[in-house]
Amino acid sequence: MQDNPRELIRVDHLSKFYRVADKQPGFRGTLSHFFNRRTYNVPAVTDISFNIFAGEIVGFLGANGAGKTTLLKMMCGLIHPSNGFVDVGGFLPQRRQTAFLKKITLVMGQKQQLIWDLPPMDSLYVNAAVYGLSDEVTRKRINELADMLELGEELTRPVRKLSLGQRMKSELLAALLHHPSVLFLDEPTLGLDVNAQARVRSFLAEYNKRTGATIILTSHYMADITALCPRVICIHNGSLFYDGDLDSLANSLAPSKEVRVELKKSYSPDQFVNYGEIQELNDRFVCLLVSRTKLTQVVSKLLSDFSVIDLEISDPPIDKLIGDLFLKGVVR
Amino acid sequence: MKRYLKTIKLFWSTAFAAQLEYQLNFLIELLAMLGTLSGSIFILSLFFSDGRQLGDWSWEAALVIQGVYTFLDGLTNTLLRPNLTEIVNYVREGTLDYVLLKPIDSQFWLSIKKFSFAGIPEIILGLGIVFWSAIRTGINLSIYNTLAFFVSLFIGFVILYSIWFLIAASSIWFVKTWNATEVLRALLAAGRYPITAYPVILRFIFTLLLPVAFLTTFPAEAVLGELKFFIILFGLALSTFFFVLSRQFWIYALKHYTSASS
């Protein structure tokens, strides 16, 4: 079925519609909702196609309700597609065959699978039994993953007494016990503080490097995506509108760079008009938007024309760019 | 198969550990169970206080039914209620996703994951009442009768489980509208008294439409040596039918599962 030996996941013209009933407010609305229910199809995902290769880390980007989660759930077999098909490692996910399920894992940031009242260790052994792992293998894997995740005595403390970060790391451990080769992660860093986020991220990068596992990830935190995913797939209103590497997305979205300059004395705005678009100007500080092609030229002119204390060139923050994009809803 | 057995062992040992986390709750559950039981025996004793009979059942024979009811109620409290009422939560909270992605039968997981130890005394007590009152009626407890009793008890349990699972599975669509527990409890409670004690029309309904008779009356008749053999065969067929139905319905329901949104 697969032409390229390294090609692991194929998503082909995939669509999903939900049947939704419309209810008007008030008693009359309720009555007509009960007796004469009108349903219509709401598209959640429309005609999406892409391929993912073994070992890739791919990030799904999109606003709330864009269809990221629906897409992810169709790829792991929880939701039956309305049209099109998904192939993951030669399996049709929605059949949920044992061999397929042993290859994948799903982690959802806002839903937990660990038993709330017991230490994670108990849940880990239940999972091990479900996956048919021997006690010896289980012990070895728990040690190995706990090392990578920096988990120790937390594993023998009731889950309800763990911090969110510790809980998430334990969830990851539980989800990876069977050594899956495809990881579906839905908002894995949701609600974590910056340090805990960074630790989860570095763990995922490490896991990918060590095992060659493929990771597919959705996140609201741009930092997750920039740190982990060389490739992003952007979804807007259920359709795919960008699939490629993160850098060229930034380039095509923002053909300009930000140049921040700190000056010895203050200047008036019109003195900067010829250098670039003024983003911000107060007292001795100015921030200009300069097109990438003219960048070196403008910077050297700035340095010669003004008395500069400090100069800094950066990309506009990617989350701002993408946020703008979703607001505008422009397709490429 | 071995994997499933080991899984059950771990399911139940973790369930036990989780219950012991809350000692007081565990004790209260035990007390509540004792209260219910003594209450129902007292009510039954009132019925017979002036030598009346229930249907054509003597006091001891009716007590056998009470015993069967107690046994099934205990089994309900240990297995059915903890597991099947949880299905709604799995659906509502979206944690069913995790169950569905485990390489193990999802109906198995949802039906057996939990185990409430507070129901065990009721199970033992139920069996005790059955055999004690059966002997008091003066009948001879043959091996055949005992065997027929356990077979029809099994039939009753499978039927109860299947109907309950069927209703619980519908939560895939209705999420919270069905309160399956109450419906099924009422059904089981109707079986606390001999089926012949009910008016003819109810007797008919309880035998054929809602198989209450199979839950309690028939096992009791079996131990008393009054159950006809063809009813056991019919019961086996009926319980198989209900079980297959629950399974097919679950498979069908999962096709419509859309998973809770994030």
Image: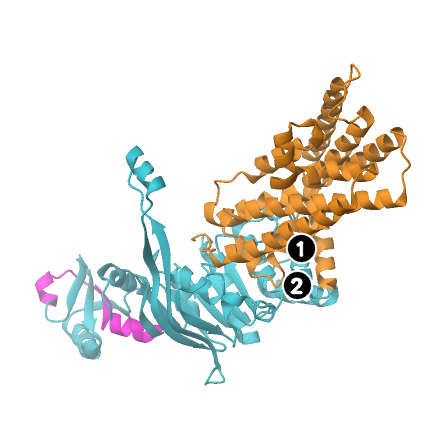
Chain colours: A cyan, B orange
What chain is tagged by disc 1? A
Are the residues flagged by discs 1 and 2 in contact, CB closer than 8 Å? Answer: yes
Q: Image quadrant for the C terminus of chain A?
A: bottom left
Q: Amino acid at mark 1?
A: Met
The magenta stretch spans which residues? A245-272
Mark 1 neighbour class, 10 Å CA radius: few under 14, some 14 to 19, many 20 or more: many
Q: Quadrant of residue B211?
A: top right
Residue designated by label 1: A121
Residue shown at the point (65%, 67%) measured from the top left: A144
Residue B121, position as x, y percentages in the image: 78, 36
Q: Quadrant of residue A99?
A: bottom right
Residue designated by label 2: A142
Q: Are marks 1 and 2 on the same chain?
A: yes
Q: Quadrant of residue B18?
A: top right
Q: CA distance from mark 1 to mark 2?
A: 9 Å
Q: Is residue B128 visible?
A: yes
Residue shown at the point (58%, 35%) measured from the top left: B182
Mark 2 element type: helix
Q: Is residue A247 magenta?
A: yes
Mark 1 element type: helix
Residue A215, position as x, y percentages in the image: 48, 70
